[in-house]
Image (tube, helix red, strand yellow):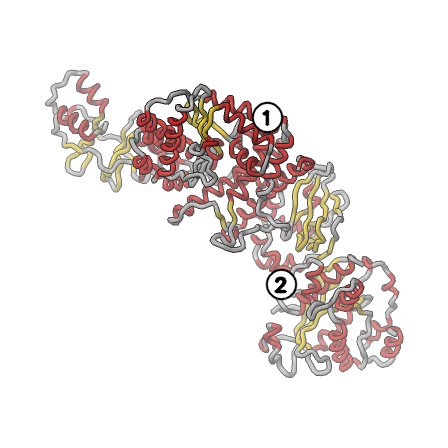
Amino acid sequence: MLRLQRWYWRRRVRDPALRALLQQSLAFRQQPFEHQRFVVLDLETTSLNPQQGEIVSIAWVVIEKGRIDLQQARHFHLTTEKGVGQSAVFHQLTDTALEQGQPFTQVMPSLIAALANSTLVCHHTPLDQGFLNRYVRQHTGALLVVPALDTLQREYRRLHRHKVALQPGDLRLGACRARYGLPALAAHDALTDALATAELFLAQQSRM
Amino acid sequence: MPADPRQPEISAVAEFLQQCVPFDQLPADARHSIARHIQILYQRKGERIDASKDDAGLRILRSGAAEIRSSQGQLLDKLGEGASFNIHGLDIGDEGVSAHIIEDSLIYLLPRVYYEAVRAQFRAFDRHFHSQRSRRLRRAARHQPNTNMMMLPIDSLYSRNPLALPPTTTLQQTAQAMSERRVSSALIMVDETLQGIVTDRDLRTRALARGLPPNTPIAHIMTPHPLQIEHSATLFDAILQMTQKGVHHLPVVQHDKVVGIITSSDLMLARRDDPVYLVQHLSRQQDTAGMKAILDSLPTLLVEVVKGGMRAHQVSHVLTAISDAITHRLIQLAINALGPAPVSFCWLGFGSQARGEQLLGADQDNGLLIDDSASDTDLDWFRRLAQFVCDGLNACGYVYCPGKVMATTDEWRQRLQGWRATVDSWTHTPTPDAVMRVSIFFDLRAVYGDAQLCEQLQQHMLQRTQVDTIFLAALAANVLEQTPPLGIFRRFLVERDGEHRDEFNLKKRGVIPIVDLVRIKALAHGIRAVNTRERLEQLMADKVITKTDGRNLLDAFDYIQQLRIQNHSQQIARGEQPSNYCRPKDLPDLTRKHLRDAFTVVHDSQEALRQHYRRGL
């Protein structure tokens, strides 16, 4: 399925960097965990609807050799058209802060470069991928079809396997982390959440 | 807002580092730079990091817990959230140290090159990792700033109302004035100007010995232009001047004006760490009211000696000597009132008084040991003695023992025979109540009377306990109930509610566990000393415990006691009643860390004891 999609979008992509990414071999996924590279990403958006909302900021951390390497951490703020509105309170961002942001076209090359030979990891991947695909397609004519893992899905399956009755909120990032004894985090920005997701991912991996 | 998305501010990591010693001492931008160089890994319970194989750098525990063990598997250290270690650095000189993850841990790893760079740049950071923890604790216990008594200003010591006489005063008038004022010297003044000084000795050697007529003017024999001392000088300066010049009296001046005089006996009195003076005063009092009046000065005295740098064990030594003196005096007063004792007896002190570890606010724990020759009617005399003394102690501020461990209780006032039987019954059937009593009872000391009686009882007791492992096990179970206030991640456990919310009791949770631990060891090995320090030293000398363990416990004990008296002294200075409660949040970071170390030592020793008596428990 993934290969088919990649083949499809490879032929329609206008951006050479993305084409190279879509042409890469996926053989790295067969390697042991310690030899794989993961890009754990989080977005802050103005809405939960990928078709309407705007990305406010985008951040990722990289896992290599089984460790999160914070030297490769990135945190971008994007310019938005509609302003932040209500969710500013939530994300502790203001319009002034966003004025210092940059357009997505400037961020995309870094993102595509980071994703080379890597698996994308998010907490609830469909949402983040939905946003990214809409933005990427707008600028390249293609989708960002890369191997992806979802810490939320993994947690859901694990709890399901153990026949745990789920309560609302049990799959939220903080609740998932607590089950692995990971500390609670107060701040709420894209980088902190990306880091929190990456730590959760390592904890999950250690139990597989 | 980060200027460069390629070097983002990793606030979650930096904020965590800010709460960790020694990262908290670094400037904020250094922490942010460190945060960017960190690698994060998750290690499962049971994983092990060997010094020989791992050269990765500094591991900081973000969550979870780890133990550091020697190659023989001996536990060296226990680490919780916020603690950091570089296993390679810990291994120097001791091959084969390893770290064991005992709870699933999220670990922030600062790679070696960056770790070394930070150490090179910041000295405080470097020092922190320079030595192992037990050594750190030892330093903390010994090298606290020790402001010497000698550096106290003489300001509070000199008498401000010296005898001043004009030069025309006759020898006889001078001698009369000095006798009247009960002073040993007189200043010879014209108006406000000091002309000379005359002392007892001058009157003897320069006047009497030479047969001068009594009406000779005093100016004739005075020492003109005497040495003087500034009122801001220290005790040290004063003693130095007196010994160098061979004088005993120094006029004190301020802005060239005489404001008083200081004598060598003033300086002696200044040595208030010597309880001799207080004790002497106490022994002259005719009633409890007089004693109480003297004791009222104890809190201020404590503040002064703590400020003067006196160590906790010296303070408790002094305070114990004082309560001994009061007991002595009360017994003497009782004998004056009741007539002489019908048979010989010994007044016993228990608990902290016996151990010589009393601090302010101690209650009374005592008993009365009576010679076997006492008849039943004689016992009535002792009942009245006990009543008199215990009431007196209570009036002096040594409140009645809530557990009734007092000579007024029949069980604690017996003939030697009776005491022996009581000890036997306690050790035979160690009910929780008996065990509790015994743990108080085993710290005993003869405070007044026939010490031989006390010795016989103590011998009997040690004979019984040394062989009775079931009893020792019961005693162990009892003492292990009180644990240091540390949670699983070495966080301080504080009271959840009530008057002492967010505080813990330094005595109950810190001192008592150590005292109890050491007592068991001492009893099991027939050691007669009752003072905790002496017991520990004896245990080390007998090789019952290792030097390292013994010294660690000693340091922990000293450290917690020191914190207690400092706490008391601060409370008194604030006008509060001294209490043993302490709020960990109010302590400076380093003190908290040392205290945590001290508690860890106690905890580990308790674990060892638990293992030892496991079968009996």
In which quarter of the view is residue B438 placed? top right
Query: Residue B17 versus residue B246: which sits nearer the camera?
Result: B17
Q: Judging from the image, what secondary structure is the residue with disc 1 in?
A: helix
Query: Residue A7 versus residue B454: which sits nearer the camera?
Result: B454
- Which chain contains the residue that carries disc 2? B
* In the image, residue B274 above or below residue B59: above
Visible residue check, residue B239? no
> In front of the other: label 2 or label 1?
1
Q: Position of residue B531 (x, y in %)?
A: 51, 31
- Which chain contains the residue that carries disc 1? B
Q: Position of residue B558 (x, y in %)?
A: 52, 37
Residue linked to disc 1 = B464
Residue linked to disc 2 = B11
Q: Which residue appears farthest toward the left when viewing the image? A: B215
Residue at image x 39%, y 49%?
B574
Which quadrant of the figure contains the N terminus of chain B? bottom right
Left or right of A11? Residue B501 is left
Q: CA distance from mark 2 to mark 1?
A: 63 Å
Query: Residue B7 versus residue B486: which sits nearer the camera?
Result: B486
Q: Position of residue B241 (x, y in %)?
A: 33, 30
The amino acid on which the numbered mark 1 sits, given as a three-letter code, is Arg
The amino acid on which the numbered mark 2 sits, given as a three-letter code, is Ser
